[in-house]
Image: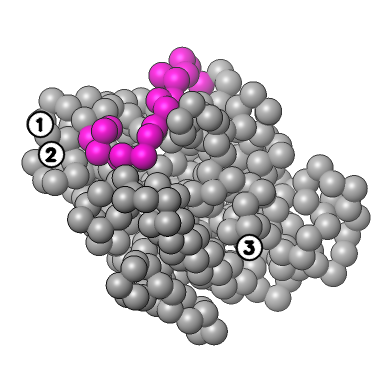
Amino acid sequence: MLVGTWNLENLYRPGGPYGPRDKATYEAKLASLAATVNRLRPTLLGVQEVGDPAALDDLVQLLDGRCTATLSQYPDERGIRVGFLADVGVQVVADTAAFPEAVRPVQVDDGGRTVERAGRGVLAVHFSTRATWLTAAVCHLKSKLLGYPGGRFVPRDEGERARYATYALQRRAAEAATVRALADTLVGEDGRRERVAVLGDFNDEASAATTQILQGPPGSEIGTPGFDHADKGDAKRLWNVAPLIPEEQRYSRMHAGHRELIDHVFVSHELLGHVVRAGTGVPPGEGASPEPLPSVGADPQERRDAPGSDHAPVWIDLRP
């Protein structure tokens, strides 16, 4: 059973301000995305950057077998939101964008504007079959690619760049706390009994402070000396499966020529014992791999008419 996450990169129907400029470009993008999903054959795939729900419906029509789409009701200002593609019936158990009660609004621009909710909602679903069950949450945290007043992607000076990087970091941290709060409710009092996955585009690497907010008490991360030793933190801890990904595959995006793993899958104690392998891209033996990831820059508009996605899927293979 494969469970994963994939940023579909600006999935809009053509004709709007963000999507492909023409039908042929749009159809090429859909075909590329569908080819990858069909090779993955996921039981549950968290998706990000769904700008137009109708475009996701178009993608579903190109997928093999039966597949359903479930979307968050909380898009950002561009209309993009998170969701799931599933070949099993799922039940929505949570859909929220509100910061935890104790987290105050954060500043987002030089004018002092603040926000008190995540840019995109965090969606959680549950499924249960005769063989297995799983609860999964998908998120998409604030990007590190910075925008400036007037629609600019280039700062006026280093001071402006530093300020807007700070605003983005504070917002991403508050959003990570939002995801962690939801994870606490999904894991419950003892994650040693609940099969929970938290996945999505965290827009930061595994060692980043914002990403590590999702982990429980430190000291037993995969690959550390404490990993094989049970402790009282196991009940709430989430493990990032990044160390299980083969080193040569351990990236999900190329930025300015550098490999980054910014899409992650976290699992609870109970689910960790069912992970057979983890990877990025298409699993070995599932057909030809997609085209190599493009290297992206600071202006997301440069890829408006590009096929496929600038992210690679990140996945885990689970035994029942």
Asked if the stretch drawn in magenta spans residue 162, the answer is: no
Asked if marks 1 and 2 touch (Cβ < 8 Å), the reply is yes
Front-most of 66 and 47? 47
SS of the residue under disc 1: loop
The numbered disc on residue 22 is 1
Task: Name which residue type carries label 1.
Answer: Asp
Front-most of 319 and 111? 111
Sequence-first disc among 1 and 2 = 2
Asked if the stretch drawn in magenta spans residue 303, the answer is: yes
Q: Nearer the viewer, mark 1 or mark 3?
A: 3
Q: Which residue is mark 2?
A: 14
Colour scheme in use: one colour
Q: Position of residue 303 (x, y in %)?
A: 27, 32
Q: Which residue is mark 3?
A: 213
Query: Would residue 247 appear left or right of 61 to someone viewing this image?
Result: right
Q: Residue at x 45, y 30 (%)?
A: 256
